[in-house]
Amino acid sequence: MSIDDCGLCSIYYLSYYTVIMQLIYHGHAFVEIESDYGIILIDPYISGNPICSIKSADYYHDKPVIGLVITHGHGDHVGDTLALAALHPQAPVISTG
């Protein structure tokens, strides 16, 4: 591993392991990031989202959700966060104020 320091940030290069990620757009603001480590859901507006092919938070019942990210507090971004947090109590919910 090597580190470059530009004074404002540090960048870590992991040369011995590659993480494969897949970004899935589910409509409106809902994005899913799948990686070797698990799934991160951003603005999980599922119920009532006319574009989303997933119809319920229960779809993620047995999936390895490791985090929920909410960009802001509008209902079409918060969406199914409470239901998903109940299904995955180990997953942190990260949100702006």
Image (spheres, rainbow, N blue to C red):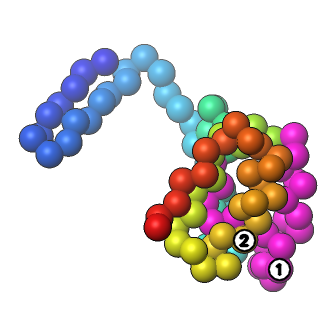
Q: Residues within 10 Å of mark 1 (few under 14, many from 20)?
A: few
Q: Main secondary structure of the magenta part?
A: loop
* 85 relative to 25, above or below: above
Residue 49 belongs to magenta span: yes
The residue located at (57%, 36%) in the rendering is 20
Compared across the picture, whether 12 is left or right of 78 comes to: left
Q: Position of residue 22 (x, y in %)?
A: 62, 48
* Picture quadrant of residue 5: top left
Q: Which residues are magenta?
A: 40-62
Nearer the observer, 47 or 23:
47
Residue denoted by label 2: 79
* 67 relative to 48, above or below: above
Q: Position of residue 74 (x, y in %)?
A: 60, 79
Cβ atoms under marks 2 and 1 closer than 8 Å: yes
Q: Amino acid at mark 2?
A: Gly
* Picture quadrant of residue 23: bottom right
Q: Position of residue 30 (x, y in %)?
A: 66, 68
Residue denoted by label 1: 48
